[in-house]
Image (cartoon, rainbow, N blue to C red):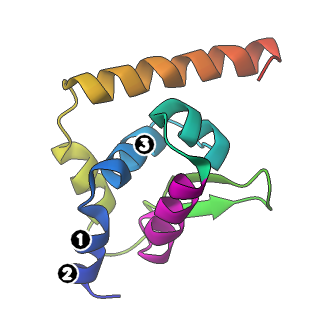
Amino acid sequence: MTLVSRLQTAAHFDRLRILGLCAHADLTVCELAKILDLPRKRVERHVRLLARADLLFCSGQRPRSSYHLNTGRTDGGLVQLLIDLLPHHDGFHKRDLQRLEAIHDARSKGTA
């Protein structure tokens, strides 16, 4: 996949939000859907596209597969550059991180 096509894949509001969340934790499609308040099928499609573009890495087997940033590439850190460029102080990102924290709390209490 070329640099341009990888950037085109990332250049979607919901996919950028997914990348921002996966910079903080390994997350399943269900967790991402809950945090983003999006239909699970839509999130599945987004993570598939991001994984195909080598921006996300899938670990584990379905249905408990989790996704995290694919920072191990030798392409000069494109994924990290995208994360650094995200507007970390906007309302969506703050709300996403609050919901992520709630999921982390539920996990640690065993109620997730």
Q: Is residue 41 above or below residue 37?
A: below
Question: Which image quadrant for residue 25?
Answer: top right
- Range shown magenta: 41-56
At a point 24% along the width and 72% down the height, the residue shown is: 8
Give the residue type at disc 2: Val
Q: Residue 39 vs residue 96: left or right?
A: right
Q: Position of residue 78 (x, y in %)?
A: 27, 64
Secondary structure beneath disc 3? loop
Give the residue type at disc 1: Leu
Look at the image and say whether residue 48 sits in the magenta stretch: yes
Q: Nearer the viewer, mark 3 or mark 1?
A: 1
Q: Is residue 92 above or below residue 85?
A: above
Q: Main secondary structure of the magenta part?
A: helix
At a point 46% along the width and 70% down the height, the residue shown is: 49
Label ID, residue 23: 3
Q: Quadrant of the N terminus?
A: bottom left
Secondary structure beneath disc 2? helix
Q: Nearer the viewer, mark 2 or mark 3?
A: 2
Q: Residue 93 vs residue 51: left or right?
A: left
Residue 28 in sight from this viewpoint:
no
Label ID, residue 4: 2
